[in-house]
Amino acid sequence: MTTDTRTQAPAAESAVLPATPDMPEHHSLETTLELLAGMDLAHASEADVVRGMELMVTHAEFPCLGAKSVFRRGSVAHVVLDDMADPDVPAQLLERLQAFADEIEGEGGFHSFIATFRGPLPTSEAAFESSLFDLLQRLHDADDESWADGVGSDPNDPHFAFSAGGSAYFIVGLHPAASRVARRAPLPTLVFNPHEQFEELRAEGRFDGMRTTIRRRDEDLQGFINPMVADHGDSTEALQYSGRRHAAGWEPPLEVKPAPDADDHADDHDGETDSKTDATTDDDTNEHIDTRQGNRNDDLAGCPAQHD
């Protein structure tokens, strides 16, 4: 069973999770998440699953300003599915992601697509990461569209971004076994954030200010900044997807199929720089910049909606 919900602002009232004096306003975020985890949302109604995520993100201590923005503006599409390993999930996700991309085309501001799963409930970060990349592999295998323009398709490429239905997304994995509070959703959840909206942030001159604020809020919540934070162009963003800390040399367990005409045109690009991974260095900031997508910082992109 699936539910596809475009959230409204404010969200509809839930039968089990109303905003009562015992809920988030009067508890820390960590305590609120513990309460939600004890509510057995895996067997609750779709409305309660959606409401549980909203209570997490809209909590005063939740660090991600972008996530708060999309929930406040009602610009979240939320689908609830039974199990990440279900063989029907890839086709369901592709259909809904393509509908989501069509719906937001030409719209300004931030949007996020959220997929929440009733199972399996992971017992560790490693178990969740395995489920996440297994699903991404099956999602990619079922996708007949060409890889999104402007981003790398090699999972080890510093300019890599996941492509689904021809659109590029930064993916944020959330689950109850996460070590970082901001990733500790009551059920396994994937947030698909369109890459284009990070370019909008930069064009409006808001990127650096939001990054600084989010890092401060995350440090206030956790006690220290996420050690996996890195600038795009320095390491693959796939390092951030599951939220698990990785040692040097880790490679994403994702195999991207070659483009249909890759063999025909391989010789044409011999010795040339792939336009998807062209990069320059900004002398003023010493940041590595993807010339087609801009320099998107993981701490701004890695939380539910935009930032971690």
Image (cartoon, rainbow, N blue to C red):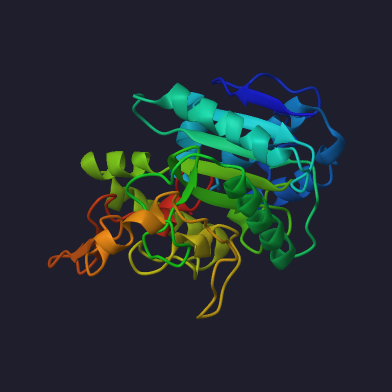
Above or below, 254 relative to 197: below
Residue occupying the far bottom of the picture: 248
Q: What number of labels is visible?
A: 0
Residue sitting at x 70%, y 67%: 126
Residue sitting at x 73%, y 54%: 176
Residue occupying the far front of the picture: 264
Q: Is residue 305 visible?
A: no
Examine the image and state in which quarter residue 235 appears: bottom left
Frontmost residue, 87 versus 27: 87
Q: Is residue 305 left or right of residue 54?
A: left
Q: Position of residue 300 (x, y in %)?
A: 40, 52
On the rendered image, what quadrant is the N terminus found in? top right
Residue sitting at x 55%, y 35%: 113
Frontmost residue, 50 versus 259: 259
Q: Position of residue 26 (x, y in %)?
A: 67, 41
Q: Position of residue 128 (x, y in %)?
A: 71, 59
Residue sitting at x 45%, y 34%: 69
Frontmost residue, 221 versus 76: 76
Q: Is residue 120 visible?
A: yes
Above or below, 299 relative to 14: below
Above or below, 210 relative to 107: below
Frontmost residue, 5 versus 212: 5
Q: Is residue 173 left or right of residue 165?
A: right
Q: Position of residue 306 (x, y in %)?
A: 45, 45
Q: Is residue 52 left or right of residue 207?
A: right
